[in-house]
Image (cartoon, rainbow, N blue to C red):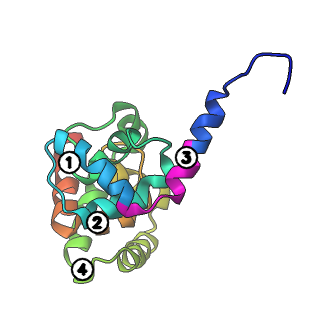
Amino acid sequence: CSKSGAKFDFKKGIWFNHQYIQKTSNADLAKLFQPKLTQEGVDAPLDKVQRVVELMKERISFIDELWDAASFFFIAPQTFDEKTAKKRWKDESAKEMADLATLLEGLSDFSAAHQETVVMDWIAQHDLKVGVVMNAFRLAVVGASKGPHMFDITEFLGKEETLQRLRKAIEVLG
């Protein structure tokens, strides 16, 4: 007990909620997230929603934040973040992304580990800068400079969706 009035530390409350989310099962969080997906017009199977929650739950403190953080898993970007595009999309990015699309198209194993190995080898063979290629790749697939490991995203999306997003970015960003 103290003589002064009680104080509520809002930042500590956010931290506690973040800790709670980390300890809650992916299945339970997916069930809490499902109504928001329905509201946004997304009909995704529960196992896919659980995978998104698994990839994103370390980045959120409230379930409400999940849609803004992870909508790109369910809906392809219609626009690209201007600030990120200006900074990350270079003159050579369109050609590099077209070459990357060709490389990814030829993969029969689209697992994250296999993609990463093949893409990193390709970058090294062509003396490209990893940061430049990967930032442009993220912008093309996500529409912004956010999200978990790039190859986890592309594995989740699958080959066809990843290629469609790459081609759209090349078309829009030039």
Q: Which residue is mark 3?
A: 18
Image quadrant holding the C terminus, namely top left
Asked if disc 3 and disc 2 are in contact, CB closer than 8 Å, the reply is no
- For the residues labelled 1 and 3, the Cα–Cα distance comes to 25 Å
Q: Secondary structure at mark 3?
A: helix
Residue visible at 58% across and 50% down in the picture: 19
Q: Earlier in the sequence, mark 3 or mark 2?
A: 3
Residue 112 bears which disc, if any? none
Which numbered mark, 4 or 2, is in the foreground of this view?
Answer: 2
Residue 75 bears which disc, if any? 1
- Asked if one can make out residue 140 in the rendered structure from this viewpoint, the answer is no
Mark 4, other Cα within 10 Å: few <14 / some 14–19 / many ≥20: few
Q: Callout 4, which amino acid?
A: Leu
Looking at the image, which is closer to me, 162 or 60?
60
Q: Which residue is mark 2?
A: 156
Q: Secondary structure at mark 4?
A: loop
Magenta-colored span: 17-27
Residue visible at 33% across and 56% down in the picture: 30
Q: Callout 3, which amino acid?
A: His
Q: Which residue is mark 4?
A: 107
